[in-house]
Amino acid sequence: MTFSQQLITWYRNNKRDLPCRRTKDPYFIWLSEIIMQQTRIEQGTPYYERFVDAYPTVKHLASADEQEVLKLWQGLGYYSRARNLHGTAQEIMTGYGGIFPDTHADILRLKGVGDYTAAAIASICFDQPHAVMDGNVMRFLSRLYGIAESIDRPETKKTIRAIAEKNIDHRNPGDFNQAMMEFGATVCTPANPGCLNCLFQRQCIAFKNNTVGRIPARNSKTAVRHRFLHYLVITVTERGTEFICLNKRTGSDIWKNMYDFPCLERTLDKTLLRLPAQEFDELLNSATPEFGEVSNPFIHILTHQKLHARFYRIHYDKKIDLPCLLVPVKDIHNYPVPKLIDRYLSKIFF
Ligand code: SF4
């Protein structure tokens, strides 16, 4: 049996039963691939199911409100993917008559679709032999072939891609690609790979050379940026209804079009000291506020950032002119918020 036959046989006998594996509809495969990027399958699957329920066709997704899409995405991070998902659904409606493109080249032209996603859709849905390259595939192949150079180097990626392209099964490219990813995710794992029972143990060069723990090699990590955020959580009671003050983020950062609170950012504040109330005057355009509860620091880790945040509560008994959007507290669930804000809200209101 060839390598690809062995791998596909293993896959058919051992694959996890996932909802996205019960279809070859390119719309659903596209949804699942975008959702699962940078996300563990266990975490991404409930999101996939929610999206399929809410938007059973590309037309439903295209005509949804962006805020609703972001809300459904909340907690997955990398929010540009949700915005691209929505924009691309609209592009498929207007540019392709609502029919998902069926060639690798056309799929690759869609916004937010890179090499990996295009290869996955083209192979799984249309049997086109384009090899996928993700972290799981690179780890598995670099160990199997004993490639010790850093996988961050373009030359190394090129070498690994050539190996994958050479081995892809032209009759079952979709199963081959999924098998590669599944093997990397469940057997040839980053820590404690299942070498002792691995069906490729005898041909695995890293295993033979006792270098499994050192492969794949990576360049030194990008420095983590620490950010110190002081959020004002302003509530207002007006005619018996409690409102909360939200800030819609309009810049082009990762949280674009989501909601948080008015915020002051400080750079050199390693201990995240409480700020004195006067510091917030510039945000409020008003008299110095009187704080209610001030939270302990919340730590939130992003890919290259570590956020340190405090939340300062202020309450007013009547509406005043505030530089933010006042929404009833009971409606706050309707607004997409970054996970850091959601963590705080779930502590104080729910
Ligand atoms: S022997 Fe170990 S390192 Fe080699 S392919 Fe199998 S699980 Fe991966």
Image (cartoon, grey):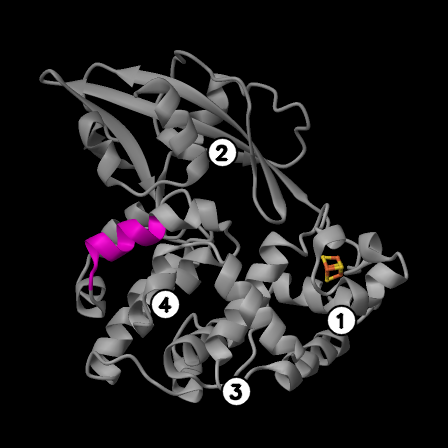
Q: Mark 3 or 1 closer to N-term? A: 1
Q: Position of residue 318 (x, y in %)?
A: 18, 18
Q: Mark 3 or 2 closer to N-term? A: 3
- Amino acid at circle 2: Leu
Furthest toward the left, the residue is: 239
Give the numbered dot on residue 251: none
Distance of mark 3 from mark 2, alpha carbons?
A: 56 Å
Q: Nearer the viewer, residue 127 or 229?
A: 127
- Amino acid at circle 3: His
User: Could you say whether the residue bearing mark 4 is in a helix, strand or loop?
Assistant: helix
User: Could you say whether the residue bearing mark 2 is in a helix, strand or loop?
Assistant: strand
- Asked whether mark 2 and ligand 1 are closer than 8 Å, the reply comes as no
Q: Tell whether 190 sits left or right of 296.
A: right
Distance of mark 3 from mark 4, alpha carbons?
A: 20 Å
Q: Position of residue 229 (x, y in %)?
A: 53, 33
Classified by dominant secondary structure, the portion drawn in magenta counts as helix
Give the numbered dot on residue 153: 1
Distance of mark 1 from mark 4, alpha carbons?
A: 29 Å
Residue bearing the label numbered 3: 170
Residue 283 higher or lower than 20, as above or below: above
Q: Tell whether 328 sits left or right of 271.
A: left
User: Could you say whether the residue bearing mark 3 is in a helix, strand or loop?
Assistant: loop
Which quadrant of the figure has residue 227? Answer: top right
Q: Residue at x 48, y 80 (%)?
A: 172
Residue bearing the label numbered 2: 264
The mark lying in front, picked from 1 and 4, is 4
The mark lying in front, picked from 1 and 2, is 1
Magenta region, residue range: 47-56
Q: Mark 4 or 2 closer to N-term? A: 4
